[in-house]
Amino acid sequence: MSGGAAAAGRSVTSRALGVLDAFDAGHHRLTLSEVAARSGTPLTTAHRLLAELVAWGALARRDDGRYEIGRKLWDLGLLAPVQLELRQVAAPFLLDVHTATRDTVHLAVREGTKALYVERISGRESVPIVSQVGSRLPLHATAVGKVLLASAPDDVVDQVLRAPTRETRHTVVDPRRIARDLAEVRREGWARTSEEMSLGAASVAVPVTVERASGPVVVAALGIVVAAHRRDLGRLAPVLQVAARGIGRAVGGSEQFR
């Protein structure tokens, strides 16, 4: 423990964790001074800790000098029992859908007001899209996000409706329209988007539901991305629903999800 850390009653570990905790959904990229201020860490100490965290891979330093979360933390997060098991259980079902359609198929869970993509399968014929494993995209602008938002607590829905971001010129940002879309998702059991997140791409998604004693719970969303000019989006929903039911049954039998 350094003298400064000891004087403040904080260990080196707690200071390093404080630096990491400076990053959140509203602060993806921070300068050195911002990290120091948000973590309550002296500037020189923050500089040293940032360098060590970058060297280890927990953080990455951009060309503009700002810092952001590194891939090492994502890799470790994938080892969490629940997330790891979800990916392992879902992978064969995603592969089945991709084999049948040749389009990009992905699995996402809700993390705050974002859709966190935990698995993805695509091929050379797939439409180019922005999502990658580890991506966090707005709930209101993606089909998997709309599915997850439709089952989210009221406070999460309210937070999204207060300030929906415009990702493309087609993104729905009118809170009343988003609310109507969510009501339709709950009624129809699937969501669709057209060029709301990526120009040239449309998407369809369905919920992955697990039966609990208190009732069905949405634990993830299964989606597919196709070219925006496709007119058969409605036909893709049943394909996804079959796979989602299989994932839900497998997940529901796991101790990790009870």
Image (tube, rainbow, N blue to C red):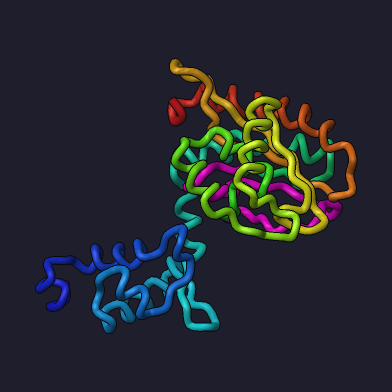
Asked whether 87 or 128 is in front, the reply is 128
* 60 with respect to 223 (left or right): left
Location of residue 130 by image quarter: bottom right
Say whether residue 149 is left or right of residue 233. left
Residue 50 at what x, y percent from top left? Answer: 37, 75
Magenta-tinted stretch: 107-135
Query: Where in the figure is residue 229, as x and y percent of width and height?
Result: 89, 49
Q: Residue 196 placed where, x, y %?
A: 72, 53
- Looking at the image, the residue that sits furthest to the left is 7
55 over 210 or under it: above or below: below
Q: Is residue 127 left or right of residue 187?
A: right
* Viewer-proximal residue among 188 and 135: 188
Q: Residue at x 30, y 62 (%)?
A: 17
Q: Look at 54% across and 24% down and name the residue there.
A: 210
Q: Quadrant of residue 231?
A: top right
Q: In the rendered structure, does residue 164 fall within the stretch colored magenta? A: no
Decide if residue 233 is on the left or right side of residue 112: right
Name the residue at 38% across, 79% down. 32
Q: Does residue 258 sit above or below 104 in this rendering?
A: above
Q: Count up the numbered dots.
A: 0
Q: Residue at x 67, y 47 (%)?
A: 142
